[in-house]
Image (cartoon, coloured by chain):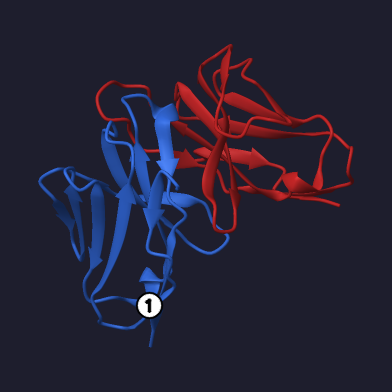
Amino acid sequence: NAGVTQTPKFRVLKTGQSMTLLCAQDMNHEYMYWYRQDPGMGLRLIHYSVGEGTTAKGEVPDGYNVSRLKKQNFLLGLESAAPSQTSVYFCASSRSSGGAAGELFFGEGSRLTVL
Amino acid sequence: RKEVEQDPGPFNVPEGATVAFNCTYSNSASQSFFWYRQDCRKEPKLLMSVYSSGNEDGRFTAQLNRASQYISLLIRDSKLSDSATYLCVVNRGNYGQNFVFGPGTRLSVLP
């Protein structure tokens, strides 16, 4: 069971470079999310998607863009990387059923360093 | 003030000890509550949901006090394998994008 898969796992960038993080889930979940985790801050939501072709901004969207062209994939792009974007990035997915929101399933994380 | 706050930790306890974590949330419209566990350099994983009546899963007991906007997690008979960071998570609404994470409390269970 693959669940949620993120690539790459590690990346070092120079300031100003661009890159894309790929997230893929095989659970047929409607909702997908990108979080970043920094020491002492907790996970913060960057962008999310409630279905194929839809995206929306989260708490810290500046400097990032996303796309959800296929239901199973959610891409996070950094157009011009900055040292402040050094972080661990987690992709997650969840079902969209009503009532109390269900469990979040996370990928293993992508460690990004911007020099 | 953060929307979800937790004991700063770290907690260092001997094997077999009972340890309690506290969490408070500021948004009274929050509707569902969870504890996640995150091992060092790993992804968070759901430990348990928290229900209004309180719930128990083996050695773990979660309590919710909506009036005080307070959530707790009690771990009895701590094991070495319980060493991890415990994240309090609050969902503001019925839809998944409203998850808010606390900063986490780190637990080290010592032999």
Residue B65 in the image: above or below residue A47: below
Q: Picture quarter containing residue B51?
A: top left
Q: Seen from this angle, which residue lies furthest left?
A: B53
> Which residue does the image show at 44% across and 28% down from the upper left?
B97
Q: Is residue A111 visible?
A: no
> Which residue does the image show at 61% across and 34% down from the upper left?
A60
Q: Residues within 10 Å of mark 1 (few under 14, many from 20)?
A: some
Q: Picture quarter containing residue B90?
A: top left
Image location (x, y in percent) of residue B107? 40, 71
Q: What residue is disc 1 on? A: B80
Colour for chain A in the figure? red
Residue A97 in the image: above or below residue B89: above
> Which residue does the image show at 31% across and 51% down from the upper left?
B24
Q: Seen from this angle, which residue lies furthest top?
A: A53
Q: Is residue A21 visible?
A: yes
Q: Seen from this angle, which residue lies furthest bottom?
A: B111
**Element assignment for label 1:** helix
Colour for chain B in the figure? blue
- Marks counted in the figure total 1
Image location (x, y in percent) of residue A98? 28, 21
